[in-house]
Amino acid sequence: MTKQIVPVLSMQVTYQCNIACKHCGPYCAPDEKDWMTVPEMKDLIQQAVALGAENIVFTGGEPSLLGDDLVEILHFVHRDLKLPFSRIVTNGKFASSYDKGVRVFNQWKEAGLKEVNISCGEYHQEFVPIETVANAYRAARDLGFVTVLLAGEFLKREAGKYTPEMYEQAIGERLLSPDEISPYISRCHGMSRGAAMPYGRGKEYIKPSQLEVFQESKIPSICRDVLAVITVHPNGNTTACCGIMVRDESLLNIGNWRQSRLEKIVKEANQDIVLNWIRYLGLKDMKRWLKEKDPSLPFRDQYQNICDLCAEIVYDPHCQELLLKHGAERRDDILVNKVAMDAVEGGIRYGRTTG
């Protein structure tokens, strides 16, 4: 069986948004003008399918601003290409009433959309009333989408205005997080409880005292989304994970889809030392190695999550320089782990035993 080199294609279709959240990683706002065209989106999706993609994610900015073009693209994904999965990440502002939410979501469902993520949390609700989020959730749930998740981004308890319990109260039910939901159910409806992070526009607004952080020992080290989720941006950038997707230069940037085909970009990325290091040896190993190279590096010992740990490294110019200049020293160890972990993953995926 051919290996999927792009299992998931995440399409940040525009930087334009109908709100301007203070924490926005990619600096999206109503006055942003970068968009993908319909032919560009179709071409990118076809390229990704040729590389094994089975799930297309539409995000932004606000992808509902595509209007009828979104319906056309969803038909293309499901009717023409026969893909099994698609997901939208939306702020749900269109659901000012339950009936309006049903009308919009039903269009997308009839076009084949399978999963809905509704962004919410500390900074979204400055622009979108929490009742609107509840309307959107109920509408999507009642239409029977395979996945309906409120994707919450919160500050530390007591540091912000909004809490997960407020959304549960507005909706009238307990919203389980994905890790609490049984793997044996056919539908996943609930709420993820993530963190608003001080990147992108958040650098200007979010204070360290507002963040819930954990000792490094509690933070995962290996990120299996790297090189598994490929994100294409409306300015042409391509990144090797779903990530916080800020527009600053980082080691997660792997090319420009307007200048090269995805196959070339992704195949070169799959040979990249830094990306394979993150995926197979982990960020904590990378951090230890960097500290040995330069003990003066001002690393923290507490982080919000694995993305926070990753960002401290991949967006730092000095870390970038050290990794690009000397990172090949770890090539052999990365390769050993890569062979072992891919063998195990392949055995699980295709029903084989290993060892």
Image (spheres, rainbow, N blue to C red):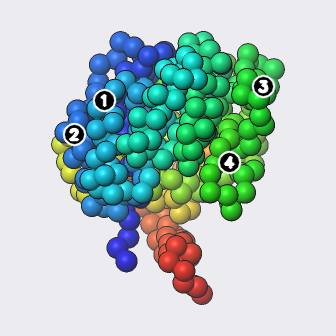
Q: Residue 203: x and y, percent?
A: 55, 21
Cα–Cα span, label 2 and label 1: 16 Å
Query: What amino acid is found at the position of numbered circle 2 in the picture?
Result: Glu
Q: Residue 344: x and y, percent?
A: 56, 76
Looking at this view, is 98 or 195 the one in front? Answer: 98
- What is the number of the mark on residue 169? 3
Query: What amino acid is found at the position of numbered circle 1 in the picture?
Result: Asp
The residue to which callout 1 is attached is 68
Query: What amino acid is found at the position of numbered circle 4 in the picture?
Result: Pro
Residue 16 seen by the camera: yes
The residue to which callout 4 is attached is 178
Q: Quadrant of residue 211?
A: top right
Looking at this view, is 165 or 330 the one in front? Answer: 165
Check the image and name the residue furthest to the right: 158
Cα–Cα span, label 3 and label 1: 33 Å
User: In the rendered image of this protein, does residue 303 appear above or below residue 66?
Assistant: below
Mark 2 vs mark 4: which is more N-terminal? 2
Mark 4 vs mark 1: which is more N-terminal? 1
Q: Residue at x 41, y 34 (%)?
A: 107
Badge 2 element: helix
Mark 2 vs mark 1: which is more N-terminal? 2
Query: What amino acid is found at the position of numbered circle 3 in the picture?
Result: Gln
Mark nearer the viewer, 4 or 1: 1
Cα–Cα span, label 4 and label 1: 31 Å
Mark 3 vs mark 2: which is more N-terminal? 2
- What is the number of the mark on residue 40? 2
Question: In the rendered image, which quarter contains the C terminus?
Answer: bottom right
